[in-house]
Each structure stands twice: as structure tokens, then as C-alpha cells.
Amino acid sequence: MHPQELREKALSLVKQGLSINKTAQQLNISSASVSRWCQQAGVKSKYKQIKPKTITEKDILKTVKGKKVATVREIAEALGVTYSILGRLRKLVREGKLKSIRIPKTHNSTIKRYLANYMNKTLFYINEEDFKKWYFSKLPRYVPKHLKRIFTHILHDIGIEVEEKRETKTAIILPKEIKQQLIEKAKQEGVSVEELLKRVI
């Protein structure tokens, strides 16, 4: 939206009865800008103007920690402020208190299905473990190996390494009679033979 159009829209919303803070939130601009425009145009809000909310560094870090990973918009909404918080987020990244990353856009429709809302956006997080948990929580519960490899490669490309856990299986050879006894015992206890063996081994 053109700056003049944005100003007119803001003034119109305040005239219609929307508060300065709500107008600022709706248009993703600062309350100070809306307030200044209203003063210049002689438009008065029917609400008593509340001082902008004071957000501390602790509030920001706690919000990001709670979400594990979040976009600027998600952080701003959680704190009840506007996009003007971006400058403070960047400062925390420079100070090493926050980390930021961008997931690149892809033409792979399967990946887009799960990560479309986060692609090509700056994501903020505190530590890599949180990021990995968040990232893999976006995938379906059961992911085919080839797809999991693709998602892992995306992480690798943006500088986050994931150790692949290899599943080890133990084979036990049992005489027929003992195997049959185990099957019957497992049925009696309402568990699988595997679970029964785990108790013994």
C-alpha cells in the first residue's frame, strides 16, 4: 500500500471508532505513526491513548523459547506489538542471544505441503535442538525414508546437521517348543512376543 493510502486508511479507521493501537496492529505499522497522522489531520480517537506496551528482552526470549521457532509475525502477535519488533530481534541475533535462519523456497510439492508457511521467511530460535524438534514436528508422524532424507538435506543446506539414527535389530533363534510356549504366554498376558522377550533380555 502507498504511504499516502496507508495514512488515509489509518485515519479512516480511527474516524470509524477503531483505537489507535488496534489500527496500528491491523495495518502492521507503529502506533506512533498513527498517532502522529491523527494529530496532523486533527482526528481524535474516542479512546484514551494507552502508552505502547513495554516489551523486555526477557519477554522476547521467553516467547521464542515457548514457540521453539517463530516468525516475526508470530512473535509480534504473541507479545501484542507490531512488526517494529524486528529491529530488536536482529539486535538479539547480533548479540548471540537469538539465532535466525531462512528455509529456502522449493518446487517440491510434498515439502511445500508441510513447510509452505515458513519458507523464505526469517525464523528465530534459541538453540539448534529446539529448531530440529520444531522442524521435524511439522512432518507427518510416519515419514518415508526418502522423504526424511530430503528434509534432512534441507537442514544440511542451511547449516544444521542431523545425526541419522540407525535402527538395530537383534535376531533370536529359539527351538519350536519354546517359541510356542512364548506365543501362548504372550496371549495369556495380552502382550506381543517381542514385549515378552524384552522383559527377559
Image (cartoon, helix red, strand yellow):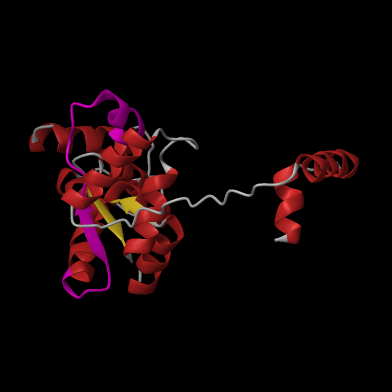
Q: Position of residue 76 (x, y in %)?
A: 33, 53
Could you say which quadrant of the image residue 60 lies in?
bottom left
Could you say which quadrant of the image residue 187 lies in?
top right
Whether the magenta-drawn stretch holds residue 104 is answered as: yes
Total label count? 0
Q: Position of residue 14 (x, y in %)?
A: 31, 39
Left or right: residue 170 compared with residue 193: left
Q: Position of residue 193 (x, y in %)?
A: 75, 43
Q: Position of residue 78 (x, y in %)?
A: 42, 53
Where 132 falls versus 94 (above or below)? above
Where 191 falls versus 61 (above or below)? above
**Front-most of residues 192 and 25:** 192
Span shown in magenta:
94-116
Where 70 falls versus 88 (above or below)? above
Tell me if residue 48 can be seen. no
Left or right: residue 175 compared with residue 157: right
**Front-most of residues 177 and 86:** 177
Q: Residue placed at 34% from the left, 56% from the top?
A: 131
Quadrant showing the N terminus: top left
The residue sitting at the bottom extreme is 95
The residue sitting at the right extreme is 188
Quadrant showing the C terminus: bottom right
Whether the magenta-drawn stretch holds residue 16 is answered as: no
Q: Residue placed at 91% from the left, 41% from the top?
A: 188
Tell me if residue 176 can be seen. yes
The residue sitting at the top extreme is 109
